[in-house]
Image: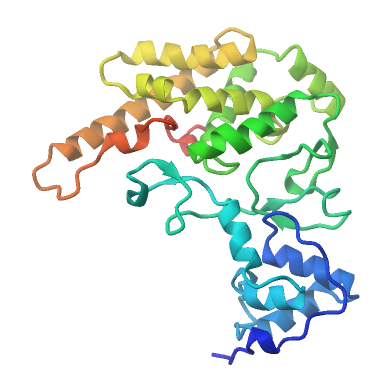
Amino acid sequence: MKRQTPAANVRPLPRTVQPLPAETISGFLGRLATANALTPRDLRLHVTDLAGMSPSHPNLERAAEWAERLGGLKPGHFADDARRNAMYVRCQHYAWQSALCRRCGYSQRARTACRRCARGEQTSVRSRGGGVCNRHQRWHIDGADIDLTPFQEYAHAERCLSGTLWKRGIGLTTGELQLAASLIRYWSIDERPEGRIADRMATIGIDSLDADSVFLVAYPEIVRLTAILTDLSFASYLLSPRFSLAEQVWALEAAVVTVMHGCTTPHLHQVAERIVARGKMAVETAFSMRQNANNKRPATLEKGQAPGRGVAVGDPSGVG
């Protein structure tokens, strides 16, 4: 293993850049390199050498000390930033209540930052929130830069995701939004979107709600549906063994058609039935674990349904 160079011995680069909130270390180094007339590759190799990492598979996110020194940042900047933008989790350290645990918390998966916030440069962030920059009213996922000024509902959805849903432990890639997006996409197979969604599709230039476009076009509805599905009372109803499968499927369909201002469809019914059936199966399995005398750590269903946070229903990976 290569020997590390103490961060205190590293000289800062002449030009500095202001880091974005929860910017990744690799993204920050790329912008720092550009500001100092270096290629990102050159600076990456330099940091790799300073940190004593293998040049074949370096993980620059572990080189915070050297990045902070090169960029003229205060020691611990990236660690402090990560704590401020950590995901809410449920763990034994806080009696299974939703909290920002320093030991169990983690950062959201990195996503591309708003190009306007980064002054035209490309970088990535792990900040709380999703695909909308409310400051510039732009959609910025996967490097896009789409004007959302005519559609203020995106700003409301982003505030909900970074506020209410974030405190439920829900982020852009935790699965709940993908589940809601799948339900809306299956609904749209038989029902043509109207109203605001149709206006967005025409403005953005999208003809249909497929797997690639549904997140962009129906983002406000996806966030709203996610808020309903993860509400404690609604999720408890869908997971309760006291109600029939038909009743719970009807409730799930009703949530979708209420958000979409439409009627239920055959495709929506089929996927809703699969989701609820899978959820009921998971609950029955958990109950059987509690009743098994050989199980030293029985499942505790109440952990996922404590006040203040709902639970997602079903596995979005099995919904197409």
**Position of residue 9 measured from the top left corner of the image (x, y, whole percent):** 69, 89
Residue furthest right in the image? 37
Q: Nearer the viewer, residue 38 or 158?
A: 158
Residue 10 located left or right of residue 259: right
> x and y percent of residue 279 in the render?
36, 29
Q: Which quarter of the picture shows residue 6?
A: bottom right
Q: Residue at x 33, y 16 (%)?
A: 245
Viewport quadrant of the N terminus? bottom right
The front one of 48 and 203 is 48
**Residue at point 81%, 18% (across, down):** 199
Name, please, the residue furthest toward the left: 293
User: Residue 120's image quarter?
Assistant: bottom right
Residue 44 visible to an observer of this rendering: yes
Task: Judge whether 5 appears above or below 311 on screen.
Answer: below
Which residue shows up at 82% across the image and 50% down it?
A: 117
Q: Is residue 210 visible?
A: no
Could you tell whether 116 is left or right of 21 in the image?
right
User: In the figure, 257 relative to 85: above or below?
Assistant: above
* Residue that protrudes farthest toward the bottom in the picture: 3
Q: Is residue 297 left or right of residue 50?
A: left
On the image, which quarter does residue 210 sit in?
top right
Residue 10, horizontal then vertical, whole percent:
72, 86
Residue sitting at x 75%, y 65%: 28
Whether residue 299 is situated above or below residue 250 in the rendered picture: below
**Number of residue marks:** 0
